[in-house]
Image: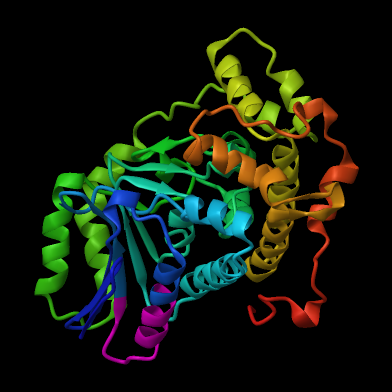
Amino acid sequence: MSTYTTDVHAERVGHLGLITLNRPKALNALSLAMVRELNHVLQQWQDDAQVRAVVVRGSNKEGPFGAFCAGGDIRYFHQAALSGDVTLEDFFTEEYSLNHLIQNYAKPYVALMDGIVMGGGMGISQGAALRVVTERTKMAMPETHIGLFPDVGGGYFLGRCTGPACPEYMGEFLALTGHVLRGGESLQVGLADVCVDSSALPALWDGLHQQDWGSGDAVVAWLRAQCKATTEQALAVTPAWHNAPIDRVFGLASVAEMEQALQGADDWSVQTLKALQHQSPLMLCVTLEQIRRGRHMTLAQDLRMERDLVRHCFQTDHLSRRGVSSETVEGIRALAVDKDHTPKWQPACIAEVTPAMVQPFFESPWPASAHPLRHLS
């Protein structure tokens, strides 16, 4: 059984469900149609006794692999916000429902995270039973670059970063700076499980086709075995942040205090401060609160919080800002539309952000009985 849409290719091969994200010119960024197709296929396969595991990969302009998923389609976000397109609301509700489905999937779900894995790409991979990266993986949650926050469950999984070389406040560092984890670095912070050389991916994919899998667990065990040597090599590499004072800085109570703590002349402080000062000051403060709340929430609670947050991002009524005047639309404009890379943030600096600007983001615009994600458990 195969289903082909323009941007998603799903096929059942033996006892496996195999998905290829097929929008390479956009680095497989998720559209609403893709989110709906993924939800549909995964729900079908969850109820199909013949499907024992699901494996998802991306594609590039030359063929399979190369870019897993660069996130959500931010150009669509921009256009929809300016035109009042109500499907923008549907996108986030359905995307977050998909994230929850994957995190709670009844069968092993495997993500082959080659190339770019950012934003929405993290949302469809972090819930996997096995998260496979390569030396080409570039993993990040860079939403503060566009006046947004690390959504798709970012408050949940970034708040729980843990690993053999993981600072306690790594989640805050990744969320606020948008720092890119390269290759096996993601293993060190618990955002991937195994690493394999990208040149081995075609053979892995073919190997999945060639066996009659008796169980989903057998699929995961076979893939772990194929990745064992490369994973051990990746874990033996000292991560770039080994001597960086991440906990001393990102464990502080506020973004303003972090900014002050980064006034040193060493290269890490200079580069980290530069990253923070490029982002939306308002959304940095919202993001810090999101990560610290999400660390103590269930995934369903976190996704409901993030659904509230994203509504406020496009309709920031407590600051009398909507559409073109919102931080998110301005951030997307500067990065992806006009490409001038000079967003005009309001407020313009971290010191000007007040609690009265931040706290209303965390007030739900819906009563609990009418929340668009009330069905998540």
Q: Is residue 165 visible?
A: no
Instruction: Describe residue 181's horizontal placement relative to residue 160 as left or right.
Output: left
Observer-nearest of 187 and 27: 27
Where, by quadrant of the figure, is residue 87 drawn? bottom right
- Left or right: 257 in relation to 373: right
Horizontal relation, residue 284 to residue 47: left or right: right
- Give the quadrant of residue 132: bottom left
Q: Residue at x 63, y 50 (%)?
A: 159
Q: How far from the left and from the top, in percent, is residue 246?
A: 62, 29
Left or right: where 262 falls relative to 33: right
Location of the C terminus (image quadrant): bottom right
How far across and down, in percent of the image, does residue 316 sit?
Answer: 77, 52
Q: Quadrant of the N terminus?
A: bottom left
Was residue 44 drawn as part of the magenta stretch in this picture? Answer: yes
Can you see residue 216?
yes
Q: Is residue 32 above or below residue 315?
A: below
Measured from the top left, where is residue 15 in percent x and y?
22, 83
The magenta span reads 38-53
Front-most of 350 and 224?
350
Query: Against 219, is 81 above or below?
Result: above
- Residue drawn at x 66%, y 10% as measured from the top left: 264
